[in-house]
Image (cartoon, rainbow, N blue to C red):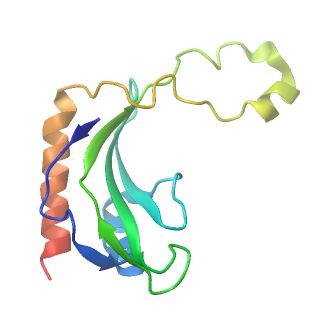
Amino acid sequence: MIELSSKVEGKQFDLYKLEQKLKPIGYSIGGNWDYDHGAFDYKIDDEESYQFLRLPFTSIDGQLDARNCTVKLGRPFLLSHIYENGLDDDASTGNFSGAINQFQEPVDKDGRVPDRFVDIGRTLVQELETILLSD
């Protein structure tokens, strides 16, 4: 994980309006959200492992699944999820196993972020600042 300082850190937004700004440029709400915190993820790469820019947020007024929820943004960071190669190579495991093991867990949820993605992450943070702070 590599934290990237940003002017958006600490800023507050209506969650619905924030989604309307971020989804069109490739962000999605990550799967590990709870009623009071979550994150927007931007997938940078998925060739060797999954590289994400993550923008965490915390609810300061309401719950995330309710209308008119206000969130406070945290510090963006780069994240690398490393998956084991070749798990789908053996198709003889049968339908039952496939139904249970459909989703693979990362081998390393906090792998090393390759250097080439750090500059991309900084550029994405600048784009976030432009889009979110231009009003």
Q: Is 107 or 61 nearer to us in this picture?
A: 61
Q: Is 104 or 88 nearer to us in this picture?
A: 104
Q: What residue sits 78% from the left and 29% below the top?
A: 98
Residue 70 x, y percent position in the rendering: 38, 79
Residue 103 x, y percent position in the rendering: 65, 35
Relative to 78, 32 lies left or right: right
Outermost residue, bottom side = 68
Relative to 46, 78 lies left or right: left
Q: How many marks?
A: 0
Q: What residue sits 52% from the left and 52% below the top?
A: 32
* 19 to 26, vertically: above or below: below
On the image, which quarter does residue 80 sit in? top left
* 94 to 90, vertically: above or below: below
Residue 48 x, y percent position in the rendering: 39, 23
The quarter of the rendered structure image containing the C terminus is bottom left
Q: Is 21 or 78 nearer to us in this picture?
A: 78
Q: What residue sits 14% from the left and 46% below the top?
A: 122
On the image, which quarter does residue 52 sit in? top left
The quarter of the rendered structure image containing the N terminus is top left
* 132 to 86, vertically: above or below: below
Residue 6 x, y percent position in the rendering: 14, 57
Relative to 90, 40 lies left or right: left
